[in-house]
Image: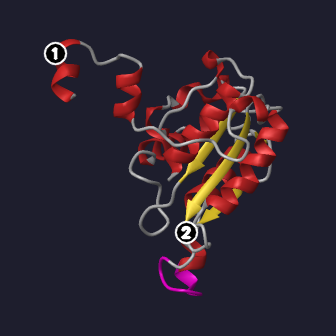
């Protein structure tokens, strides 16, 4: 659900006042860790996999960030960040120590490292729990409202009053943007 949340944030920011060129949405692994110090603002939406691990599309980013942490110490003073973590507080059993330790662990670890490297937290880190009645949506709704307010994103200008709209699959986006052309597109129709 981390990618879904990231896409919703990017779409809302684009539609709510930020220039399309100023908003990029990608998996952690596709982001060049070496450029982190050049970013004025980074919004992370990080799911929890397995026993408190980074998801498959974020493990390489996490390893590279840790490997280069000495290089980045104090270098992120010009970078602000916001972080939303997703997890299941009962994944290892309701009320167990393992569940407590591993819930949102990647987000907590990333928050700790970003702060250690000198980056400035824009808003308090938010968490979404699959055990909530509506899964992570309550936590995400509260957190993104704070984020949009802090960023000055116009909610009304962004479309639906209460919703970011459906998250489109990569295939739908490619077709709508006409990235798929000619016989390949026709074969897919």
Circle 2 packing at 10 Å, graded few (<14), some (14-19), many (20+), is: some
Q: Report if residue 10 lies within the magenta region.
A: no
Q: How many marks?
A: 2
The magenta stretch is 91-98
Residue 97 versus residue 25 in the image, above or below: below
Q: Nearer the viewer, residue 165 or 32?
A: 165
Task: Please state if 37 lies on the left or on the right of 150 as rendered.
Answer: left
Q: Residue at x 72, y 39 (%)?
A: 81
The majority secondary structure of the magenta stretch comes to loop
Task: Please state if 79 lies on the left or on the right of 30 as rendered.
Answer: right
Snapshot quadrant of residue 168 = top left
* Image coordinates for residue 58, horizontal then vertical, percent: 46, 46
Q: Report if residue 93 lies within the magenta region.
A: yes
Q: Say how the picture is coloured.
A: secondary structure
Which mark, by number, is residue 30?
A: none
Residue 124 versus residue 94 in the image, above or below: above
Which numbered disc, 2 or 1, marks the residue that appears first in the sequence? 2
Q: Residue at x 36, y 16 (%)?
A: 178
Q: Kindly identify which residue carries mark 2.
A: 130
Q: Nearer the viewer, residue 182 or 50?
A: 182
Q: Of helix, strand and loop, which one carries label 2?
A: loop
Q: Residue at x 68, y 39 (%)?
A: 160
Residue 125 seen from this side: no
Q: Kindly identify which residue carries mark 1.
A: 183
Q: Nearer the viewer, mark 2 or mark 1?
A: 1
Task: Please state if 147 lies on the left or on the right of 55 as rendered.
Answer: right
Q: Of helix, strand and loop, which one carries label 1?
A: helix
- Quadrant of image for the C terminus: top left
Task: Please state if 42 lies on the left or on the right of 181 as rendered.
Answer: right
Task: Give the alpha-carbon distance from disc 2 to disc 1, as whole Å.
Answer: 42 Å
* Image coordinates for residue 54, horizontal then vertical, percent: 47, 55
């Amino acid at each position: 659900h981390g990618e879904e949340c990231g896409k919703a944030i990017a779409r809302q920011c684009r539609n709510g006042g930020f220039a399309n060129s100023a908003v990029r949405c990608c998996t952690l692994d596709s982001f060049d860790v070496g450029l982190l110090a050049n970013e004025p603002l980074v919004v992370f939406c990080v799911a929890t996999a397995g026993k408190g691990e980074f998801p498959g599309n974020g493990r390489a980013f996490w390893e590279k960030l840790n490997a280069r942490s000495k290089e980045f110490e104090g270098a992120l003073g010009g970078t602000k960040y916001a972080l939303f973590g997703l997890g299941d507080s009962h994944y290892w059993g309701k009320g167990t120590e393992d569940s407590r330790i591993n819930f949102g662990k990647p987000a907590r670890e990333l928050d700790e490292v970003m702060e250690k490297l000198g980056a400035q937290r824009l808003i308090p880190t938010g968490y979404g729990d699959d055990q909530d009645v509506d899964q992570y949506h309550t936590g995400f709704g509260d957190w993104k409202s704070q984020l949009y307010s802090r960023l000055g994103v116009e909610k009304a200008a962004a479309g639906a009053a209460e919703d970011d709209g459906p998250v489109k699959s990569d295939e739908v986006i490619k077709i709508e943007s006409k990235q798929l052309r000619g016989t390949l597109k026709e074969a897919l129709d």
